[in-house]
Amino acid sequence: MDRPVTALDVAQKAGVSRSAVSRVFTPGASVSKRTAEKVRCAADALGYRPNVLARSLITGRSRIIGLVVAYLENQFYPEAIERLSRHLQERGYHVLVFMASNSGEEADEVMEELLDYQVDGIIAASVGMSNDLTRRCEAAGIPIVLFNRAQDDDRLSSVTSDNYHGGRKLAEFLVAGGHKRVAHIAGWEGASTQRDREAGFVAGLAAAGQTLAARGVSDFDFERAKTIAREMFSSDTYPDAVFCANDHMAFAVMDVLRFELGLRVPDDVSVVGYDDVTLAAWPSYDLTTVRQPAGQMARATVDILMDRLADPETKPRRVALDGPLILRRSARIPEGWTT
């Protein structure tokens, strides 16, 4: 056959209607298993592949979701991206991944590019949205869901862990362990995750009559966290515990304490983090941390996005999922608490 194989050729070979062929290659469309098998066998025999771009012009849907990520150094994000991608693929959508810093201008430039690709929706992972760009996306009928970040904008849906109560759990744990000089190494202060984790942590300390003994800001950067740790633990009255706003920074702090300063973890200093990435469970760190329920967060994010795509009038939702405290050996375990 010299001309390109068409859906009509497949329909004739399979003995079905052309609309049946279309349904087989349309994600989510209703078609019997027997019909689907006949159509796919015929398509394979003829070498037929549906023209996705042509279909998008007809339907007005690209079936592409733009996924914008601020950084991948933190192990939480590769895992989260994989989970988000799998859930979207199960719904018949493809993913375009873009990188953007927390800078408002760069994030907006990336979002502009996404609009050029005519994506059906946007998931922004730890990336903020400007009011103007949010308005334009809403006007274009492109729903946005923030992942692991919230924003004071009633038009935006968001999915996070319960960062406030997660931070408070860590404070209560350290207080119960008898710590008196508790420090905090913060991430990027423009992030809702950072603000909420620290607010919960400080509230937990206040309930026990304590305040932060020391504080540094590392913007979630590994090397900066090491520098802050060197400064924070340079005096004789160094903290006896430190809460790092994510596991990525906690690993940096533990490396400095043990291998540069000769301090014992947790005998001299307890270290706790937030996320529970895979490396946290490795014996070399054995990090006490709050687990972000990445699977539940990804599923909730995709569910909200699909609801908005199915019905643009669906109201935005904000979801905060509880994350459990995972006890390991990087911190002194209070009497009566079990790992």
Image (cartoon, rainbow, N blue to C red):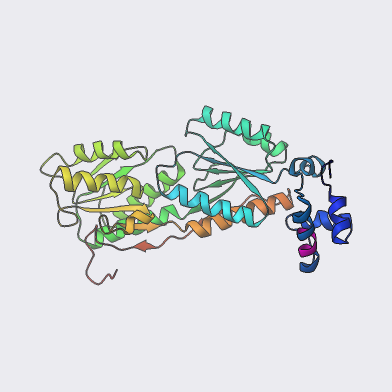
- Of 16 and 165, nearer the camera is 16
Q: Which residues are magenta?
A: 36-40
Between residue 309 and residue 213, name the one nearer to us: 309
Q: Quadrant of the N terminus?
A: top right
Task: Say if the magenta span includes residue 37.
Answer: yes
- Apparent side of residue 294 relative to residue 214 in the rendered image (left or right): right
- Where residue 189 appears, as percent x and y from the top left, is 40, 38
Quadrant where the image shows the C terminus = bottom left
Please, what is the dominant secondary structure of the magenta stretch?
helix
User: Residue reaching furthest left?
Assistant: 236
**272 and 315: which is toward the camera:** 272
Q: Is residue 66 magenta?
A: no
Residue 20, percent across and down?
84, 58
Q: Is residue 276 visible?
A: no
In the current view of this chain or complex, which residue is farthest to the front? 1
Q: Which residue is found at the position 84% from the left and 47% from the top?
A: 6
